Image: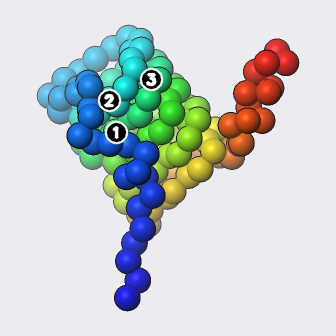
Amino acid sequence: MFKKKNNFDANINTDKIETIIGKNTNLEGNLKSQGTIRIDGNFNGKIDVDGNIIVGENSKIEADITTDNISISGEIKGNLIVKGQAQLTSTAKLFGDIEVQNIIIDDGAIFEGKCKMTNSEISLKKEEIK
């Protein structure tokens, strides 16, 4: 009768993933990319994606992240700035603050931090003033 609606699928087209960091991969440094990126391995540093990020269930990330949309199934330690939507699935662990327009947190997800929900138009105006 009731079907779980997942609006996030409309924001990330998994058929168009440009970059994949595999589950047996460990990376350190700064990652700057465009398009959709999937992270299944371990990453330590800073991530700036002009596009979407999919964080796999077994991934462990220690990084501050800026992106358009993000789907988290693994573990992230760091602060996030998400221009659009963030989804924390039931296996997600987020330890850090998040600034986001829309957020979906599934049952079972762990989120320890502060959440600031913003309107992208307001945020852009604040940046123009600076």
Q: Secondary structure at mark 1?
A: strand
Answer with mark 1 or mark 2, whichever residue precedes in sequence.
2
Marks 1 & 2, CB-CB < 8 Å contact: yes
Q: Secondary structure at mark 3?
A: strand
Residue 99 at x, y = what percent? Answer: 64, 38
Q: Label 3 sits on what residue type?
A: Val
| Few, some or many residues within 10 Å of mark 2 (<14, 14–19, 20+) | many
Q: Secondary structure at mark 2?
A: strand
Which residue is at the front of the view, 89 or 121?
121
* Residue at numbered disc 2: 37
Marks 3 & 2, CB-CB < 8 Å contact: yes
**Scheme of colours in the image:** rainbow
Which residue is at the front of the view, 11 or 109?
11
Q: Quadrant of the N terminus?
A: bottom left
Image side of residue 128 versus residue 35, left or right: right
Which residue is at the front of the view, 25 or 33?
33
x 50%, y 30%: residue = 67
x 32%, y 29%: residue = 37
Image side of residue 3 versus residue 99, left or right: left
Which residue is at the front of the view, 1 or 91?
1
Image side of residue 122 versus residue 98, left or right: right
* Residue at numbered disc 3: 49
* Residue at numbered disc 1: 54
| Few, some or many residues within 10 Å of mark 3 (<14, 14–19, 20+) | many
x 27%, y 46%: residue = 57
Marks 1 & 3, CB-CB < 8 Å contact: no
| Few, some or many residues within 10 Å of mark 1 (<14, 14–19, 20+) | many
Residue 66 at x, y = what percent? Answer: 52, 26
Residue 57, above or below 51: below
Image side of residue 112 versus residue 3, left or right: right
